[in-house]
Amino acid sequence: MKQLTISILAIMAVVANINLNAQTTNAHQKALKMEQIKVVVHHNPFGLVYDDAITENVAGKVNIHPVTYKLNGIDIAANVYTPANYDPSKKYAAITVAHPNGGVKEQTAGLYAQHLAEAGYITIAADASYQGASGGEPRHTDKPIYRTEDIHGMADFISQYPGVDANRIGAFGICGGGGYTLKATQSDKRFKAVATLSMFNSGEVRRNGFQNSGLNTIQQRLKQASDARAQEASGGKIMYAGVASVTDEEIAKTPTDLYREGYIYYYRTNSHPNSTFLYPTSSLLDLMTWDAAENMDLINQPLLMIAGSKADTKYMTDEAFPKAIHAKSKELFIIDGATHIQTYWRPEYVEKAVSKLTEFFGKNL
């Protein structure tokens, strides 16, 4: 997508210039002011917002099948991707794909689900409970127990799907979905292989702040979450944390790659009406006491963790990976030059990730 690439490069160039010329005059800094980031509109009949997405189901090719199913009384919306020349009378390995925090199935989770279907797998990408097109109130609730249960639920559904070999199911998660995939597979041994991409430990970040920037405010934020819960219990308005919208100027001033590039991806180039960075403040009561890297020793399946060499979230993968001491096999695969968000969409990095995932699941499913 030329428009996407130009927009991303434009903002990166400006931020780089600002960093390199911190001592320049105000007049020169104004000259470097970022041009408006254009919003990319995707017209896809399935609502998909990634490049080269399926636009119609064609016989003999990868097809997409929107499905719904119940999980603990909640309607879950998902997309199942079937490989080329899919024959329900045959047996296929299947892979669950858990989306990032704030994301939905139509974004990068769908991109990887489609690519893995192209490699011959039946894949499923589902919107988390309370999020996306799935049901549940309050909206955008982000609790680890629900996100982990969503992954168990995908296994429930896809194991019964025509053509799926229930003994050959793999789990794959991106960003926050990667952290929740680690947790789900610690106990759920229906998953025979586990992979993550740009894993984000939601509990650690909500507790300690990104890159441990919030260590001094932990108790303050727990108090805010407690007050929010009390307000909900009394029938008051639900309080939300996170970001609802962001201006181009705010994007340019964001110092971390994760959030600056994330704002561009989620609010400009790959935006989706069901995707949001908001979540109820009361969710922090559960998030701040949770950690994806705890009990990693329970993973005895083969494990693959992928991260970009320039990802400012890589420290979370580095923390979790050594703790998987009982994994049948494990590999840390680094994509040279990639940041966290670039693994979501940038073709050369997606290609490397998909190639490695295909090799890994091909060997272990």
Image (tube, rainbow, N blue to C red):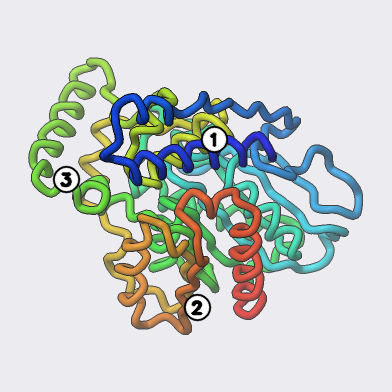
Q: Is residue 119 left or right of residue 327?
A: right
Q: Residue at x 73, y 31 (%)?
A: 44
The alpha-carbon separation of the residues under discs 3 and 1 comes to 36 Å
Q: Pointer 1 and pointer 2: residues touching (CB < 8 Å)?
A: no
For this rendering, which residue is in front, 14 or 85? 14
Q: Is residue 305 left or right of residue 255?
A: right
Q: Secondary structure at mark 1?
A: strand
Q: Amino acid at mark 3?
A: Gly
Density class for disc 1 (Cα within 10 Å; few <14, some 14-19, many ≥20) is some
Q: Secondary structure at mark 2?
A: loop
Q: Residue at x 63, y 56 (%)?
A: 158
Density class for disc 3 (Cα within 10 Å; few <14, some 14-19, many ≥20) is some
Q: Quadrant of the N terminus?
A: top right
Q: Position of residue 357 (x, y in %)?
A: 60, 68
Q: Quadrant of the C terminus?
A: bottom right
Q: Which residue is identified by label 3? A: 214
Density class for disc 2 (Cα within 10 Å; few <14, some 14-19, many ≥20) is many
Q: Amino acid at mark 1?
A: Asp
Vertical arrangement, residue 313 with respect to residue 6, above or below: below
Q: Residue at x 39, y 46 (%)?
A: 258
Q: Residue at x 38, y 41 (%)?
A: 259
For this rendering, which residue is in front, 131 or 155? 131
Q: Which residue is identified by label 1? A: 75
Q: Which residue is identified by label 2? A: 302
The alpha-carbon separation of the residues under discs 1 and 2 comes to 32 Å
The alpha-carbon separation of the residues under discs 2 and 3 comes to 34 Å
